[in-house]
Image (cartoon, rainbow, N blue to C red):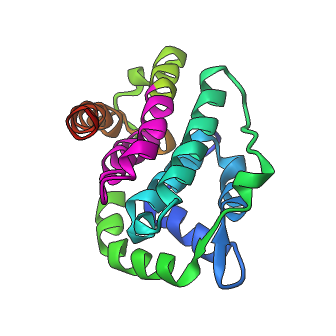
Amino acid sequence: MSQTLNLTQTLDMLRDDSEGQSISMDDVISTLENRGFGPLLLAPALIAFLPTGAIPGIPSVCGILIFLVAVQRLIGKNSPWVPARLRSVEFSRDRFKDGLEWIRPWTERIDRLFRPRLSFLFSPLMSRIVAALCVVFGLTMIPLELVPMAAAAPALAIILAAIGLSTKDGLFLLLSFVFFGATAWLALTKLL
């Protein structure tokens, strides 16, 4: 990835780089595809985590998109491919804007925390481990959608991993591992 991207900037790009009353997954992908895999994992995870994640079907679509992006990273592709049917899924721009305004004070505070650190965590092997976790937990979002707001847990873990990848911040990458573990526990207790 050629440059880092902060959380608030990612959300603003998604809001500003599309037109009409809805935002499609194609808008999300088109806006972020030249910025690397981190933002492409971050965007659908944020959509699933924000109030838009309460819309039936959205966490599953986001989970599938995360799965597709992460599995391609896992096998070493430089840029992701996403099927046209998934690119056509849309959600309300107004609901996204409302969620963005609600979360903006938090994202601005979080953005001040990002900085490149613990650079030893960004080896090719670690990148593949993170991708494998995102594959698993992206798929976990699908059955967790049946429990109200439960898909937000894996979405949060993926958000932290994507932030770590996007900002080269190893602290957030380590924090994501804690949340992946907590999400695994949640999934096992809620689904079994």
Depth order, front residue of 54/37: 54
The magenta stretch spans residue 138: yes
Magenta stretch, main secondary structure, is helix
- Going 53% across and 54% down the picture, which residue do you hit? 44
Give above or below for 76 relative to 102: above
On the image, the x and y values in percent for residue 130 come to 45, 27
Boundaries of the magenta span: 133-162
Query: Is residue 4 something one can see in this rendering?
Result: no
Give the left or right position of residue 71, taking residue 190 as reference.
Answer: right
- The one nearer the camera, 7 or 136, is 136
Spot occupied by residue 114 in the image (x, y as percentages of width and height):
36, 49
Is the C terminus in the top left, top right, bottom left or bottom right quadrant?
A: top left
Q: Which residue lies at the image location 47% right of the left edge and 34% below the top edge?
A: 134
- Residue 147, magenta (yes or no): yes
User: At which x and y percent is residue 82?
Assistant: 73, 44
Q: Where is residue 53 in the image (x, y as percent from the top left)?
A: 43, 63
